[in-house]
Image (tube, helix red, strand yellow):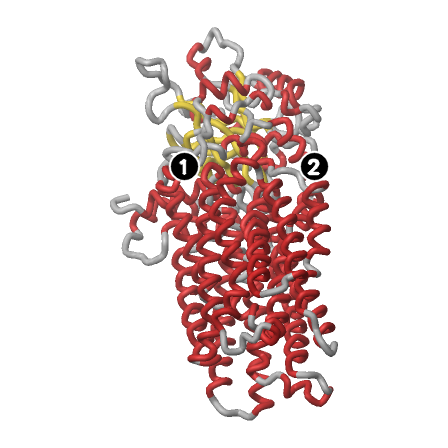
Amino acid sequence: MMRGAALVAIAAAIGNLLQGWDNATIAGSVLYIKREFKLQTAPTIEGLIVAMSLIGATVITTFSGPVSDSVGRRPMLIISSVLYFLSGLVMLWSPNVYVLLIARLLDGFGIGLAVTLVPVYISETAPPEIRGLLNTLPQFTGCVGMFLSYCMVFGMSLMDSPSWRLMLGVLSIPSIVYFGLTVFYLPESPRWLVSKGRMVEAKRVLQGLRGREDVSGEMALLVEGLGGGGGASIEEYIIGPANELSDNEQAPEKDQIRLYGAEEGVSWIAKPVTGQSTLGLVSRYGSMANQSTSLIDPTVTLFGSIHENLGDMGGRRSMLFSNFGSMFNMGDQGNNKKENEDVESLQREGTDGSGVDSDDNLRSPLLSRQDTDVENPASNAIEQVSGMDIGGGWQLAYKVSEGKGEDGNRKGGGGLKRIYLHQENTTGSRRGSVLSLVGGDVQVESECVHASALVSQSALPSKDLISQFSGEIEKVKPSAIAKGPGLADLFDPGVKHALVVGVGIQILQQFSGINGVLYYTPQILEQAGVGVLLSNLGIRPDSASFLISGFTTLLMLPSIGVAMRLMDVAGRRSLLLSTLPVLLLSLIVLVLGNTINMGSVVHAVISTVSVVVYFCCFVMGFGPIPNILCAEIFPTRARGVCIAICALTFWIGDIIVTYSLPVMLTSIGLQGVFGIYAVVCALAWIFVFLKVPETKGMPLEVITEFFAVGAKQGEPGA
């Protein structure tokens, strides 16, 4: 079912393999570049050669997000592969330092596009249940590229006169493979296609990615993602058989959502719950306003409540909702005969009678006017709405508020409301429980479940939704609701809140020193004395450092494999909080090993083990997760601009760390450098604990809605 999305993610992640290849190659070849151009006494030029690709990445990143919003993700990835290829050819030729710098600049352009857009592309194409796993692939392929490159550099270093030009120029070969994949295999992002009104194409892409014909729910979700929801709130619903809950004549029908099951004649009713909430999510939401003195961000508390209530279900589809099929319907109460007629009508319009949508399910209306009820005219104001599975156990439904103002429009707070529903972690029967429903306590003698509901204003006004969704979904005109990306979006409370998280974690990741260590691993290990470990084999110190570096990257691969397995189980936040302390400890040991005189062999062993542990823990958490989070937490309308801001922060930090590392190694030594990195890691743990929420298993549009709710609760006086 998820095979299409997984293969597409693997193909896109080849761009990060080329980045890893380049990182390792320049780390090895810079030793020989220094000798040819006599840069031993010019650490500034040496740092510039390495950092030039980072400068290129920074420049291109400034435009990559907004441009990708305009022309698409796929064309930008194609351009990235072309830039990789051209830079490899120029580096192979480089007659002097200046041409080499130009080649490194082109290489940086390719790297910037790939590193910025591949996580976005994967997030926009992956299903919520495995989005974390697939978005860890770029980290995995990057390490594969590093390992292959170190093997190549080690082999060349054993030659009498190693050629750094050949080391760098080989990049052109895998870039041809990447070009072929981007041109002939990768589809365009379905979210981007929907934003441009190319609904038929988006449907076709989604069907290929999901491996099924029924993608109506996700199509509706993507349309909703084009606009920001207003007045988002969290509500609690109780869901049970329609013939049980509908017996309560005091419950207003306008607040009821009818959910039709897969079996003919079976329907369920969802009713809002008032009074004392029994749900952790709603209870936490109600109490967040009282946390003004707490240092923990309200958004962290809110997201934590969501995952506590999901319990062991994680991102899997709710057991209850799997029985509902894909139809949530809102309408007037009727007898069982009327219910059967409604279900049969729905089956004729969009299903095959078994609860599975037909191939042409998108031709069935998502919203249509019910037949006029002469005996109950008031019920005519309620439209019939479909509810749809949108992944991760979440369902999308709608609620239409009644009442119009003098201008003919719906009154404030009215109009079409979208509802993101998720079954809470309640198991077994609720028989005999007294449920506080609208209109009074109701004794429910049947199986009922609780469901969380995130309710907000729909992206479309109800009148537009009625007129455009009354036919095929392909007729929806996103231009009616989606505005072009603008700076005004950055001042939306939810977007600002997400930017604080995204920019903050990118800054801390870079100043933990990882990229500087990666670029200069051979030199760091050589300075640490790893040559002692291999001197008996007759291997030169520079070749020994390459071999140790290659072995280190090889050990990183299973670590990333563990991270891929846990990313959608334990979650992003948990992985960060558990790996950062190990990172800190390894850095402290490394500092002590370089401060205390333990002898050359012990010193080399401690340094090597510490670097290996540092790398392995880094790629399990702090390596992939910042990019994963940044690709998840921004709304569609502002994703390109916000990703550009976060990526710009990433590359500027990378430049500072990489350019300053040679100077820092000369002035304060290894112990001083890693001491600074240890302090940053400690600060990073505090930041994650206080500010970074858990986003596993949630549709992107739901994540951004919760950020808006959390930002609202975090405002003074909220």
Front-most of residues 222 and 243: 222
Q: Looking at the image, which residue is at 52% across and 30% down?
A: 223
* Residue 186 in view of the camera: yes
- Circle number at residue 486: 1
Residue type at mark 1? Gly
Q: Is residue 409 left or right of residue 396?
A: left
Q: Looking at the image, which residue is at 44% across and 28% down?
A: 417
The quadrant where residue 539 appears: bottom right
View extreme (front): residue: 95
View extreme (left): residue: 717
Front-most of residues 287 and 606: 606
Q: Is residue 186 left or right of residue 435?
A: right
* Alpha carbons under labels 1 and 2: distance apart: 32 Å
Q: Earlier in the sequence, mark 1 or mark 2?
A: 2
Q: Residues within 10 Å of mark 1 (few under 14, many from 20)?
A: few
Picture mark count: 2
The quadrant where residue 104 appears: bottom right
Residue type at mark 2? Gly
Q: Looking at the image, which residue is at 59% across and 28% down?
A: 198
Element under disc 1: loop
Q: Residues within 10 Å of mark 2 (few under 14, many from 20)?
A: some
Q: Where in the figure is residue 203, as x and y percent of width and height? A: 64, 30
Question: Which residue in the structure is indicated by mark 2?
Answer: 208
Q: Where in the figure is residue 259, as x and y percent of width and height? A: 55, 28
Height in image: 309 above or below 685?
above
| Camera-nearest label, 1 or 2 | 1
Q: Where in the figure is residue 357, as x and y percent of width and height? A: 67, 27
